[in-house]
Image: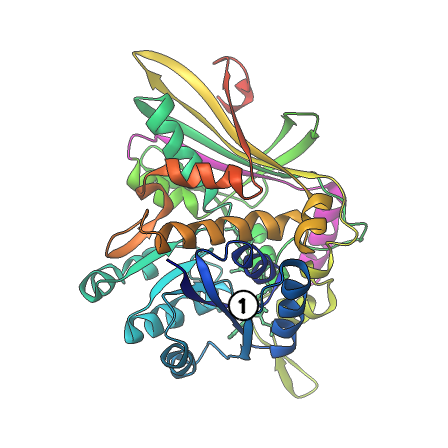
Amino acid sequence: MSKSVLIVGAGGVGSVVAHKCAMVPEVFGKIHLASRTVSKCEEIAKSVLERTGVTITTSALDADVVANTVALLKELKPDLLLNVALPYQDLVLMDACLECGVDYLDTANYEPKDEAKFEYHWQWAYQERFEQAGLTALLGSGFDPGVTNVFTAWMLKHHFDEITEIDIVDVNGGDHGQHFATNFNPEINIREVTAPCRHWEDGAFQETPPLSHKLSFDCPEEVGTYNIYQMYHEEMESLVKHIPTIKRARFWMSFGDAYLKHLEVLQNVGMTGIEPIEYNGQEIIPLQFLKAVLPDPGDLGQTTQGRTCIGVIAKGIKDGKEKRVYTYNICNHEECFEEVGSQAVSYTTGVPAMIGAKMMLEGKWDGNGVWNMEQFDPDPFMEELNAHGLPWKVVELDVEQYNQFS
Ligand code: NDP
């Protein structure tokens, strides 16, 4: 049943996806990796060959031009396009898939370059076209979004009659030894962190200033205690749409004091701006220039130590009683580096992208149209997480426990 896939994007996540697909040759029979800078694809292909013995093919692709991707899809005729380039490429890659009759998967929702807005409506607007073409588009198959959506759907299926509140908590307890670096693409990461915070309550998204709500969170299994900050994250939008009993949804992410101090200074001096400025007769975007001088997240693997702990705390009703359940994964940066040469943030995104693709290619997640992860049966995906390096645990909490979330 082996199939053929085109992976677009040779960054930190693209590298993990390529390695993990190569480790499942019975499903991913042919793998082609294309990205803007072909040397990055070649480097990944070399590592994949050394680590797995599998040869993957590569080529240069500027995916901003639909015709380029169309030409490549016509040549390769893959069963699925895995988009792990940047959110800016989502719509053009969906257009190319529609033109060539190819299924589509990504890990982050579309974002226009000139506005830091993380919303699904642009991609949901493709519903009819994918449905009519008899094609599937799976949106947000990373960790968050991605696994967090599946965790929520799984808890609803197995632990609750109704979920009323969710708190998604993303802790990176890792240390990369740099003064300032982001765990994934710096431009996307900084746009996300500095955007106004929104959470779902009383039937609408409520807006508060960025990073204005903070809690101290004790991670399980001695990962440690971290300050977590409330921020907007895209999976809340699809989760409250598809699980409408959720009355409150919040997302929290850990940040160290040094990261926040650097970010504050960079913001104060205008380095995180996305409006173009004139410099030496040339137009530059400050945030893109900042990205060019910051460490490449794909290179942080070698020095990063510690663990990530990402999960969903859900509150709801079962058999008339209120309960609270926490499902989480803990991932070790050094173990990821040993397995695929990447740190845990790329790993925790790349593995679910491979699993989402596997679900589609095996027909376990099937249907014409545009889908978010929580719309499919969570059980086979949860099994695959255990099998492919992201084992999870579930604990029932006292309703009073983690009461800071009340
Ligand atoms: P990187 O910046 O490391 O990699 C992005 C890659 O895409 C680069 O190789 C880049 O090429 C390539 N690219 C950019 N523009 C184009 C283009 N026009 N045509 C072809 N290739 C292009 O990012 P990450 O690997 O860290 O992140 C990849 C994606 O994963 C992002 O969308 C990010 O938002 C998402 N993500 C999702 C998470 C989740 O849990 N759901 C968590 C973390 C990330 P070049 O090398 O030339 O710059």
Vertical side of 367 occupied by 243: above or below: above
Between 312 and 343, the one nearer to me in the picture: 343
Q: Residues within 10 Å of mark 1 (few under 14, many from 20)?
A: many
Residue 291 position within the rendered picture, expressed as x and y whole percent measured from the top left: 67, 66
User: Which residue is painted at 35% across and 48% down in the image?
Assistant: 372
| Image position, residue 245 (x, y; %) | 29, 30
Judging by the rendered image, the residue that carries numbered circle 1 is: 9
**Which residue occupies the foreground of this view, 215 or 393?**
393
Residue 205 at least partly seen: yes
Name the quadrant where ligand 1 sits.
Answer: bottom right
In this view, the residue farthest toward the bottom is 281
Q: Which residues are magenta?
A: 244-271
Q: Secondary structure at mark 1?
A: loop
Residue drawn at (52%, 40%) of the image: 387
Locate residue 103 relative to residue 4 in the image: left or right: left
Q: In the image, is the residue at mark 1 within 8 Å of ligand 1 by its beta carbon?
A: yes
Tell me how the rendering is colored: rainbow
Determine if residue 271 is in view.
Answer: no
Q: Position of residue 395 (x, y in %)?
A: 51, 20
Determine the image quadrant of residue 159: top left
Residue 121 vs residue 310, the one in the foreground: 310
Q: Position of residue 348 (x, y in %)?
A: 57, 47
